[in-house]
Image: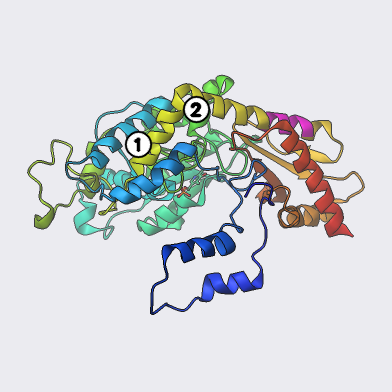
């Protein structure tokens, strides 16, 4: 709310109202509900609408997306398939996302999802199906029974959704190889090669490697071209998690970092992250539409549609049957900003992350932990008088203390085994002054927790 804190704790009375309401026997008029929303809900946002929200990876909503959300709800189609505007517009929304990040697009080779967690499930299930088929098995029929293990490779900085997907699809964390990272938190490709070779010797079949284009901790982009080459050499499915960072390719000087993005078999990216499409909007892009169709298509008689066209239904390419009209918010956000507007947003926020890195380096009480390559800056508060143990405890305590003060919102993480702070900048209205406030807020919070 304008002028209010970035975030505030929910007082006990409102917390009770929010969590313990009895099921009403009689309905109340909408005007009453609006009063309740004003008094009990709007005052307690997550905070990501505010220019000084730097937590996790959560953007403010795009105005176009906010405006279109009620229209999508009012039309209320299911975008499983059929012949109506919702499914037709999704074809354009998906193609635009591919074109924005320079990923080759063939009709049908992608769909909108709830987010990148689901996009990753769809991609990994497709890769798994293909790996089995190459061995003469149909995993949809036999499951994983009686097959030798398949190994997959992710970096130590990979998002947890990859592990979740591997567990869910029965691949097992025992065969999930965690590839160490270099000093810039990028996948170490010599280690990747070494792990693949070790698996081959042990009779485990390598089949999937996931690179990150923008990690959550530091915004690092893995060496995509090198990983693409290794994937080709060893016949691995090459997936890229670009949930947060794929759009970073639009920042002028970031382009070399992203070389090889176009070589992936699948690319997950979240319009509800940097692009600012209101939650939820994820996307999975494939090089070939046949892969996900083979892994997911299942058309019961009551859904058979002779007019479904060559591509069939979206529900034949993923897990969801009834699918919301996400495309309206994605389309409107891109159409409203235009490619140039999106480039400006990405460049503005990327530059600010670098500015924050410079402010950190110029200070004698902050320490930069990683190069700022996208719009995330990872750092640590390190007052000169503090020993390592106390600095560790302090940095663990800082995020919650900053949040409570209400002037900025920051979250922490662990990097190389130590407590770290990281600011993710996604708001078009954030300025350099906000970054100066952030550092001062961290200092003030640090004084609070040490006294
Ligand atoms: C957010 C995020 C995910 C998970 O995507 P959801 O949309 O939250 O399901 C995966 N990877 C990265 C890098 C992310 O930022």
Front residue (pair 331, 168): 331
Judge left or right: residue 332 versus residue 427.
left
The residue under the point 59% across, 32% down is: 374
Q: What percent of the width, then of the height, locates residue 273?
A: 50, 41
Disc tally is 2
Please tell me in which quadrant of the rendered image residue 146 appears. bottom left
Judge left or right: residue 412 versus residue 167.
right
Q: Is residue 422 magenta?
A: no
Looking at the rendered image, the disc whose residue lies closer to the viewer, 1 or 2, is 2
* Contact check, label 1 and label 2, Cβ < 8 Å: no
Chief SS of the magenta region = helix
Instruction: From this view, report whether residue 130 is shown above or below residue 140.
Output: above
Give the residue pinned by disc 1: 285
Secondary structure category for the residue under label 2: helix
Q: How many C-alpha atoms fall within 10 Å of the one at disc 1: few (<14), some, or many (≥20)?
A: many
Q: What percent of the width, then of the height, locates residue 175?
A: 43, 53
Front residue (pair 162, 144): 162
The residue under the point 25% across, 58% down is: 143
Label whose residue precedes the other's in the sequence (1 or 2):
1
The residue under the point 47% across, 28% down is: 337
Residue range (magenta): 353-359
Instruction: From this view, report whether residue 386 is shown above or below residue 346.
Output: below
Give the residue pinned by disc 2: 342
Q: Is mark 2 within 8 Å of ligand 1?
A: no
Q: Specify the quadrant that holds the C terminus.
A: bottom right
Quick one: which residue is furthest to the right in this view? 385
Q: Is mark 1 within 8 Å of ligand 1?
A: no
Front residue (pair 10, 419): 10
The residue under the point 76% across, 29% down is: 358
Give the Cα distance between marks 1 and 2.
19 Å
Instruction: From this view, report whether residue 16 is shown above or below residue 451.
Output: below
Q: What percent of the width, then of the height, locates residue 369?
A: 72, 39
């Amino acid at each position: 709310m304008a002028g209010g804190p970035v975030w505030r704790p929910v007082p006990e009375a409102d917390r009770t109202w929010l969590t313990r309401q009895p099921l009403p026997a009689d309905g109340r008029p909408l005007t009453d509900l609006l009063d309740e929303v004003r008094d009990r809900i709007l005052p307690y946002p997550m905070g990501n609408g505010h220019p000084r929200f730097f937590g996790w990876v959560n953007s403010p909503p795009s105005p176009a997306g906010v405006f279109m959300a009620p229209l999508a709800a009012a039309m209320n189609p299911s975008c499983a398939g059929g012949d109506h505007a919702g499914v037709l517009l999704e074809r354009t929304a998906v193609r635009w996302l591919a074109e924005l990040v320079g990923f080759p697009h063939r009709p049908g080779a992608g769909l909108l999802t709830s987010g990148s967690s689901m996009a990753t499930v769809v991609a990994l299930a497709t890769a798994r199906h293909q790996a089995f088929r190459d061995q003469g098995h149909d995993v949809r029929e036999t499951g994983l029974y009686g097959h030798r293990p398949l190994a997959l490779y992710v970096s130590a900085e990979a998002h947890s959704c990859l592990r979740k997907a591997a567990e869910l699809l029965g691949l097992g964390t025992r065969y999930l190889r965690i590839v160490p990272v270099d000093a810039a938190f990028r996948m170490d490709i010599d280690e990747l090669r070494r792990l693949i070779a070790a698996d081959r010797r042990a009779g485990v079949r390598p089949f999937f490697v996931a690179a990150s284009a923008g990690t959550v901790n530091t915004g690092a982009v893995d060496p995509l071209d090198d990983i693409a080459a290794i994937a080709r050499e060893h016949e691995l499915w090459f997936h890229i998690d670009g949930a947060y960072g794929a759009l970073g390719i639009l920042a002028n000087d970031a382009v070399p970092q992203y070389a090889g993005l176009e070589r992936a078999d699948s690319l997950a990216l979240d319009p509800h992250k940097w692009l600012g499409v209101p939650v939820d909007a994820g996307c999975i892009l494939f090089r070939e539409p046949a892969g996900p169709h083979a892994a997911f298509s299942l058309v019961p008689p009551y859904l058979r549609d002779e007019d479904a066209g060559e591509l069939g239904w979206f529900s034949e390419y993923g897990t969801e049957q009834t699918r919301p009209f996400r495309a309206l918010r994605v389309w409107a956000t891109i159409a409203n900003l235009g490619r140039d507007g999106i480039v400006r947003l990405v460049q503005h926020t990327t530059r600010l992350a670098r500015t924050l890195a410079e402010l950190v380096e110029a200070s004698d009480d902050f320490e930069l932990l990683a190069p700022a390559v996208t719009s995330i800056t990872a750092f640590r508060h390190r007052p000169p008088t503090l020993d390592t143990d106390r600095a560790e405890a302090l940095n663990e305590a800082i995020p919650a203390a900053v949040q409570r003060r209400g002037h900025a919102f920051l979250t922490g993480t662990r990097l190389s085994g130590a407590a770290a702070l990281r600011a993710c900048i996604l708001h078009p209205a954030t300025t350099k002054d906000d970054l100066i406030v952030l550092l001062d807020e961290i200092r003030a919070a640090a004084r609070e927790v040490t006294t």
